[in-house]
């Protein structure tokens, strides 16, 4: 029943509550409802992005009207329950606007999202909501525009020292790690873990803490943290686990296995990814999400040196979604199968200028692997050139890059085969430690997780 919300509706010719910029009579009038939430998540996960966008707008309108009708009057009581309800509203509405962001991106309307945020800026009268809007704008700069400097400028408006919002803090770390000491990074990560209520997020952020240690070459301590986080998540009951959390578990096990060089853990990871892929196909989720999982399976199989199977999964991933970074890893599998021609052809087909620094690092490593196999002067020169351009601020990767570059500079076609084999072996170890491990970790191709049931009205 929504009759009690009608007095809180905008007038027919006023701008709609959902932030679309359209008049209410041409947008959500007569269509907003609580049930639109479930439809929005379901449609998005199945790749029906235009329908998901409409459903998301309808649910946004319903939620904001409920906030005005119930929470705002309740706040006058000054009770803890009223403040708890306000917190729930802020978190739930931010989740919905996050989904709205994904829908705008997927429907090619990304440029409209900032103005939508402007119209939603006063949806809740609370500084925490205004910080959420700042965060969503900074996220748009990072994901839609690939502009880290503008994202950092945007999120820096928030008082980070007092902030307890896990999403804001995670984004801040991602765009500012070059500017922060390791000590501050750890302090922020601990604050994130302490303040997140979702088990999937607790796993994700604790693993990020472990990765942070690994990236400064404290691999033993980092792996202990990652292992404890994965063990804790695996002990949860089914009702406390989610599809997003299970994906984070597989990703975390993958990282742990590769850092430790433990094939048994990586095989366990493969089983996790296969189970996820089964659910993806059963639920009819998007091909783009299936592509992410198949690429991950290819990475695991490459680590285990099962390159024929890895090639199969990389090719299936590319059939689902044509992604250049997947081609970078497919090229490595080809080269390790002694098919340097196919590997070289893939690398030459890629416009590396469109890569961020992390992906460019992966691209440079692939050229290095090719060069050590072929020993052709042109491949060696290209590999050296790409490695010189590869940037990283983490000690782990700086050391890797410089070591590889020195070895390549010393490599000539007449170098003893045993030395070349050692270099190839070390390069394939470096493959598993690519710099994409640390960061916000948000991918528009992943499934979205339904709003926590605690947030349901």
Image: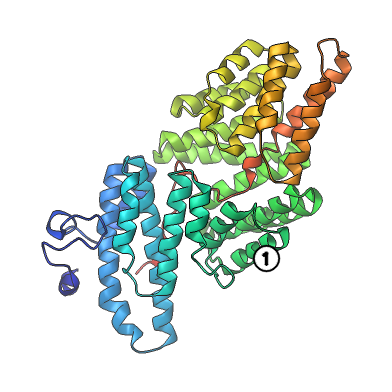
Q: Is residue 275 left or right of residue 44?
A: right
* Residue in the foreground of this view, choosing between 219 and 278: 219
The answer to whether 380 is drawn above or below residue 364 in the figure is above
The structure residue drawn at horizontal position 46% and vertical position 60%, both measured from the top left corner, is 135
The structure residue drawn at horizontal position 56% and vertical position 62%, both measured from the top left corner, is 169
Q: Where is residue 365 in the image (x, y as percent from the top left)?
A: 68, 28
What is the quadrant of the C terminus in the image? bottom left
* Residue in the foreground of this view, choosing between 256 and 275: 256
* Residue in the foreground of this view, choosing between 126 and 206: 126
The structure residue drawn at horizontal position 66% and vertical position 27%, both measured from the top left corner, is 386
The structure residue drawn at horizontal position 42% and vertical position 73%, both measured from the top left corner, is 127
* Residue in the foreground of this view, choosing between 382 and 445: 382
Q: Is residue 273 left or right of residue 2?
A: right
The answer to whether 430 is drawn above or below residue 415 in the figure is below
Badge 1 element: helix
Q: In this view, does 176 lie to the left or right of 277?
A: right
Q: Where is residue 208 in the image (x, y as percent from the top left)?
A: 65, 53
Q: In this view, does 441 lie to the left or right of 257?
A: left
Residue indicated by mark 1: 187
Q: Where is residue 312 in the image (x, y as percent from the top left)?
A: 57, 22
């Amino acid at each position: 029943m929504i009759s009690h919300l009608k007095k809180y509706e905008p007038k027919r010719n006023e701008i709609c509550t959902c932030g679309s910029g359209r008049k209410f009579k041409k947008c959500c009038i007569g269509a907003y409802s609580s049930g639109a939430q479930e439809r929005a998540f379901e449609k998005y996960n199945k790749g029906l992005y235009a329908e998901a966008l409409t459903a998301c707008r309808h649910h946004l309108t319903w939620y904001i009207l409920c906030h005005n009708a119930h929470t705002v009057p309740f706040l006058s009581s000054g009770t803890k329950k009223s403040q708890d309800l306000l917190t729930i509203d802020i978190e739930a509405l931010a989740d919905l606007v996050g989904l709205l962001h994904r829908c705008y991106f997927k429907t090619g309307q990304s440029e409209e999202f900032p103005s939508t945020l402007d119209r939603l800026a006063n949806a809740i009268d609370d500084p925490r909501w205004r910080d959420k809007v700042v965060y969503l704008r900074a996220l748009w700069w990072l994901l839609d525009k690939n502009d880290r400097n503008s994202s950092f400028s945007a999120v820096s408006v928030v008082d980070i020292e007092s902030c307890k919002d896990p999403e804001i803090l995670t984004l801040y770390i991602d765009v500012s790690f070059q500017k922060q000491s390791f000590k501050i990074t750890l302090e922020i990560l601990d604050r994130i873990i302490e303040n997140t209520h979702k088990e999937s997020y607790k796993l994700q952020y604790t693993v990020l803490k472990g990765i942070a240690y690994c990236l400064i070459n404290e691999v033993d301590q980092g792996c202990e943290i990652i292992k404890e986080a994965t063990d804790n998540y695996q002990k949860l009951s089914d009702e406390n686990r989610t599809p997003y959390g299970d994906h984070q578990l597989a990703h975390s096990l993958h990282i742990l296995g590769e850092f430790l060089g433990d094939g048994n853990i990586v095989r366990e990871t493969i089983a996790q990814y296969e189970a996820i892929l089964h659910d993806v196909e059963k639920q009819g989720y998007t091909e783009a999400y299936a592509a992410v999982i198949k690429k991950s399976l290819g990475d695991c199989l490459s680590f285990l040196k099962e390159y024929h199977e890895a090639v199969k999964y990389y090719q299936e991933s590319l059939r689902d979604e044509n992604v250049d970074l997947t081609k970078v890893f497919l090229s490595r599998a080809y080269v390790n199968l002694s098919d340097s021609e196919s590997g070289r052809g893939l690398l030459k087909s890629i416009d590396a200028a469109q890569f961020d620094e992390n992906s460019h690092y992966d691209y440079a490593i692939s050229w290095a692997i090719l060069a050590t196999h072929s020993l052709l002067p042109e491949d060696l020169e290209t590999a050296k050139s790409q490695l010189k351009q590869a940037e990283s601020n983490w000690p782990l990767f700086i050391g890797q890059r410089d070591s590889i570059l020195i070895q390549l500079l010393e490599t000539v076609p007449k170098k003893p085969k045993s030395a070349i084999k050692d270099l190839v072996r070390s390069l394939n170890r470096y493959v598993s430690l690519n710099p994409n491990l640390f960061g916000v970790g948000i991918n528009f191709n992943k499934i979205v997780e339904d709003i926590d049931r605690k947030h349901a009205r």
